[in-house]
Image: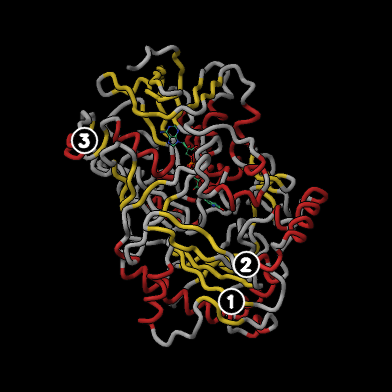
């Protein structure tokens, strides 16, 4: 039984993650409107969430991670992953690796050409600027007064200089500021952190807004479906404490439940492929076959080598850990303040490309993902000093789908390497990484092979390696594609096509995944959506 609606708000937002928290904060700046934010997870106060290194424990944590299930992926030998996504205020920005990097100019100009009118680079840059407070060297393309604190690394691992030098030797210039417009080259990671603590959207946007009387945040409340009056969204039903409740939306319902969660809510509400919904006993509100389709993920493959300098792997003993804790408490530096990735590069695996086709990630440690069973994975860390260079595809061609299972929970169907071109690019990337490890710059670290353990003699061997080691990049997007065409799930103002009073605002609307990590872009989406929604006359 659903309890009768107790309250009416102007805007009801489902999901308080990277985009949802931005939206709740920006919309409630106007004290004439009432905003409800309904979040399935809890508060984001745990120390694990605040301390940067906490992500190592948060990923896969039953209390903080949705661990969405994937069907076996035939393109990688039937392996499958639990797709992580934050289940707490701040969403994935509360559990992520804190790398702060925008998409490239070409990424957004491509969106605009593909039908996302109003989303070219020049049109989205103001929203990136609005969101951030960059504490590094000032630059005209950086924001200084936004809610989200972005900072240079507080301490760069010494081996990272070798990575940058090796990149320079193969023609990848070292960029002073990877978010300073030109992004092709190698650079140090920037992080969403404030004074050495994680800066999620919960901390940056939501926390300061919580005292507003017109913002009502309901946690541990899972949105089951949207309520329609005809074809107009007028509220949502959510489950909390074992009971179903209802809230009404006088103006709009906004779904911000992430790339896996948002299409699932739409489908449970009758917006999706009609025949499939009917088979699940769901009344069709709008036959929208693209809902859940166009799923993209930054497929990634790593190589690592033993080195002759201490790295994170060799500094995890009990005494070292005491040292790390003291360093963090005193100076907010060291391992506990560190993201995984210290250096990056945007590179091309071959000549003749319009844009970089791979992103490289330099990690001053190695870890092995051990399949525990068909549906789960665990991480094992060697004790010897080791460094990793990982490569992800900037623009994977493989596409997947979010579907509903018979229990009406989301199921992910994806072939990470379903496209032969993606495999070829990753094989090229593996050779590029070999080249970097074997360069004169790396010689000072005396790198010895670990993964792979021997020289691979042919492309066919590299392909086997790529398929065996490929993993998710934690950047799913695209399942509620934005576009001008009728089959797009949302229009360029993020309104769901075919119904009224309903938008989707989160990473799921990206028509094509950005070349790089997706959090900064999702926050930009939240900022731009807030302005679209607040525009006079609406
Ligand atoms: C482990 C991990 C590491 C990452 N590392 C980085 C990184 O270093 N840098 C980077 O740029 N990007 C990174 N990302 C990606 C980035 O964090 C995401 O792209 C971004 O946070 C997506 O934002 P979103 O608003 O679309 O979804 P989310 O932030 O996931 O928010 C969705 C919210 O909706 C809630 N929700 C879902 N379903 C329901 C429901 N039915 N009812 C109510 N609430 C619901 C969720 O609990 C969550 O709070 C990482 C992601 C993960 C998971």
Q: For this view, does 526 lie left or right of residue 252?
A: right
Badge 1 crowding class, 10 Å Cα cut-off, few under 14, some 14 to 19, many 20 or more, is: many
Residue at 32% from the left image edge and 22% from the top image edge: 227
Instruction: Tell me how far mark 1 sits from mark 3, CA to CA.
Output: 50 Å
Q: Earlier in the sequence, mark 3 or mark 2?
A: 3
Q: Which mark is residue 305?
A: 1
Q: Total of numbered circles in the picture? A: 3
Q: Secondary structure at mark 3?
A: loop
Instruction: Tell me how far mark 2 sits from mark 1, CA to CA.
Output: 9 Å
Indicate the quadrant where residue 357 lies: bottom left
Residue at 63% from the left image edge and 30% from the top image edge: 207
Residue 457 location (% of width, % of height) = 42, 88
- Figure check: 455 above or below 502: below
Q: Which mark is residue 365?
A: 2
Q: Secondary structure at mark 1?
A: strand
Q: Earlier in the sequence, mark 2 or mark 1?
A: 1
Indicate the quadrant where residue 425 lies: bottom left
- Figure check: 281 above or below 61: above
- Identify the residue under disc 3: 280
Colour scheme shown: secondary structure
Badge 2 crowding class, 10 Å Cα cut-off, few under 14, some 14 to 19, many 20 or more, is: many
Residue 242 location (% of width, % of height) = 41, 23
Badge 3 crowding class, 10 Å Cα cut-off, few under 14, some 14 to 19, many 20 or more, is: some
């Amino acid at each position: 039984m659903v309890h009768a609606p107790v309250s009416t708000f102007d805007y009801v937002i489902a999901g308080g993650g990277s985009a949802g928290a931005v939206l709740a904060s920006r919309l409630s700046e106007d004290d004439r409107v009432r905003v409800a934010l309904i979040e399935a997870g809890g508060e984001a106060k745990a120390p694990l969430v605040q301390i940067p290194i906490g992500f190592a424990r948060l990923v896969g944590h039953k209390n903080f991670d949705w661990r969405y299930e994937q069907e076996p992926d035939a393109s990688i030998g039937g392996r499958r992953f639990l797709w992580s996504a934050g289940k707490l205020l701040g969403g994935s920005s509360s559990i992520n690796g804190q790398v702060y990097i925008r998409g490239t100019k070409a990424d957004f100009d491509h969106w605009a050409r593909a039908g996302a009118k109003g989303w070219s680079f020049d049109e989205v840059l103001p929203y990136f600027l609005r969101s951030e407070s960059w504490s590094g060297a000032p630059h005209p393309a950086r924001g200084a007064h936004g809610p989200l604190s972005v900072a240079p690394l507080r301490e760069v691992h010494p081996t990272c200089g070798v990575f940058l030098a090796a990149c320079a030797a193969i023609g990848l210039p070292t960029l002073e500021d990877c978010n300073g417009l030109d992004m092709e080259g190698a650079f140090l990671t920037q992080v969403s952190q404030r004074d050495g603590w994680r800066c999620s959207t919960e901390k940056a946007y939501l926390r300061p807004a919580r005292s507003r009387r017109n913002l009502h945040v309901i946690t541990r409340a899972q949105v089951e479906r949207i309520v329609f009056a005809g074809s107009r969204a007028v509220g949502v039903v959510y489950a909390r404490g074992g009971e179903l409740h209802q809230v009404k939306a006088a103006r709009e319902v906004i779904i911000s439940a992430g790339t896996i969660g948002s299409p699932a809510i739409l489908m449970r509400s009758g917006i999706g492929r009609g025949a499939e919904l009917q088979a699940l006993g769901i009344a069709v509100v709008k036959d929208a076959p693209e809902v859940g389709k166009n799923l993209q993920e930054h497929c990634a493959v790593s190589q690592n080598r033993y080195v002759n300098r201490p790295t994170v792997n060799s500094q995890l003993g009990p005494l070292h850990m005491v040292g790390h804790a003291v360093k963090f408490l005193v100076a907010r530096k060291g391992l506990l303040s560190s993201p995984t990735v210290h250096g990056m590069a945007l590179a091309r695996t071959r000549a003749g490309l319009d844009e970089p086709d791979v992103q490289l990630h330099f990690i001053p440690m190695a870890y092995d993902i051990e399949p525990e069973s068909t549906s789960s994975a665990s991480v094992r860390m060697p004790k010897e000093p080791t460094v990793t260079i990982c490569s992800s595809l900037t623009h994977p061609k493989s596409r997947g789908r979010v579907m509903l299972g018979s229990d009406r929970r989301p199921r992910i169907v994806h072939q990470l390497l379903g496209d032969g071109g993606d495999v070829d690019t990753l094989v090229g990337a593996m050779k590029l990484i070999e080249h970097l490890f074997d360069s004169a710059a790396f010689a000072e670290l005396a790198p010895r092979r670990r993964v792979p353990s021997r020289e691979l003699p042919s492309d066919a061997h590299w392909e086997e390696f790529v398929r065996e080691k490929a993993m998710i990049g934690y950047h799913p997007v695209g399942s509620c594609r934005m576009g001008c065409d009728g089959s797009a799930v949302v229009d360029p103002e993020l309104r769901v096509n075919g119904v009224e009073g309903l938008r989707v605002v989160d990473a799921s609307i990206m028509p094509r995944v950005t070349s790089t990590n997706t959090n900064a872009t999702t926050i930009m989406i939240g900022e731009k959506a807030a302005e679209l929604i607040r525009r006079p006359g609406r």
